């Protein structure tokens, strides 16, 4: 967009360049043009008014407003900014219009800053309060949309069949026999579980880990994500209650037997909330952890009003 030569002089406050009388004359002419529907003529007169007196903030605002109405948003925005960047108190209407333009461009932080300048001195300014609510709602909507988009992309990635990846025949065959069909299934398996399967060796493990690393993923990540979600769900469920303190209690509070305690330590559980985020199947998958130890853990958690995570949780 071509800018008027006036752009290079707006904001100059040298008194030798000010001609307030001429500026007022051009403003009056601009008002007449606007009243007759001659917006182009009004813009031309306001330009002359500002050129005659760069310190005439009222003429500067009206020029910005006319350009705003004509769709010349870039220049209007720059002029509104100059209206607000003055030694005197910023023009309230310029701040409000500037906030709207910033919001339209997705610059929510700048829009909020403009409105905050208004509300700091006029906390009950109706338009500023309404605009602030609108901007905050728009900001939250963008966040939700981004979260939904990220969730959709992640779900699509996790649903990718493992057959789509360049793996050796042996690795593919082992994964198929272990009923690992998708990338999501693979992320729920640990290195130990893969190596414990017949004919699955170090070379296949290295191959799979390399493939996952290239995608910024790792074995067991799916389990960790499930545990984090379970812990968050527990925190949300008991938010504001005495149970919050229970979730933060150390595992030692359970007074488990040596065998059960060692198994829990292998799962890197440090609090009751950590333990409650695991399933019975995960505990039973630990070496030397049997039905007796499982019952012990469940009974101890019950005493604190907690339980292990179910598969559908």
Image (spheres, rainbow, N blue to C red):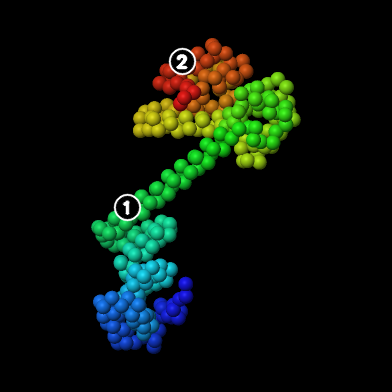
Q: Residue at left 45%, top 76%?
A: 3
Left or right: where does residue 15 sit relative to residue 163?
A: left
Residue 92 in picture, x, y percent from top left: 30, 66
Residue marked by disc 1:
133
Tell me the tag on residue 164.
Answer: none
In the image, what residue occupies the spot 31% across and 77% down? 38
Return the x and y of residue 209 as percentages of the image width and height: 67, 34
Pick the front one: 162 or 225? 162
Vertical arrangement, residue 111 with respect to residue 91, above or below:
above
Residue 57 quadrant: bottom left
Residue 29 in sight from this viewpoint: yes
Assign a secondary structure to mark 1: helix
Residue occupying the point 43% across, 18% down: 302
Residue 80 appears in the figure: no
Residue sitting at 53 percent across and 33 percent down? 225
Seen as rendered, the residue at the extreme front is 37
**Mark 1 or mark 2: whose residue is earlier in sequence:** 1
In this view, 263 is above or below 61: above
Residue 204 percent across, percent down from the top left:
72, 29
Residue at image mark 2: 299
């Amino acid at each position: 967009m071509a800018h008027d030569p006036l752009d290079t002089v707006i904001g100059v406050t040298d008194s030798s360049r000010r001609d307030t009388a001429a500026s007022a004359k051009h403003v009056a002419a601009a008002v007449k043009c606007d009243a007759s529907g001659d917006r182009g003529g009004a813009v031309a007169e306001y330009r002359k008014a500002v050129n005659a007196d760069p310190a005439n903030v009222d003429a500067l605002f009206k020029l910005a407003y006319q350009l705003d109405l004509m769709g010349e948003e870039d220049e209007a925005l720059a002029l509104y900014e100059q209206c607000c960047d003055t030694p005197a108190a910023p023009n309230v209407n310029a701040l409000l219009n500037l906030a709207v333009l910033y919001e339209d461009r997705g610059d929510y932080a700048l829009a909020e800053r403009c409105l905050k300048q208004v509300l700091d001195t006029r906390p009950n300014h109706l338009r500023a309060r309404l605009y602030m609510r609108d901007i905050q709602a728009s900001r939250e909507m963008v966040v939700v949309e981004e979260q939904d988009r990220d969730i959709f992309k992640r779900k699509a990635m996790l649903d990718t069949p493992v057959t789509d990846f360049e793996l050796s025949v042996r690795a593919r065959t082992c994964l198929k026999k272990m009923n690992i069909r998708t990338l999501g299934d693979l992320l729920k398996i640990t290195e130990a579980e893969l190596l414990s399967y017949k004919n699955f060796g170090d070379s296949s493990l290295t191959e799979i880990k390399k493939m996952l690393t290239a995608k910024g993923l790792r074995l067991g990540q799916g389990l960790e994500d499930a545990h984090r979600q379970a812990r968050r769900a527990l925190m949300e469920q008991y938010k504001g209650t005495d149970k919050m303190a229970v979730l933060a209690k150390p595992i030692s509070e359970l007074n488990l037997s040596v065998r059960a305690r060692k198994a829990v330590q292998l799962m890197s559980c440090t609090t009751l909330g950590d333990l409650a985020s695991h399933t019975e199947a995960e505990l039973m998958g630990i070496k030397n952890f049997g039905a007796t130890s499982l019952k012990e853990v469940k009974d101890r958690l019950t005493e604190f009003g907690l339980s292990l995570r179910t598969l559908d949780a």
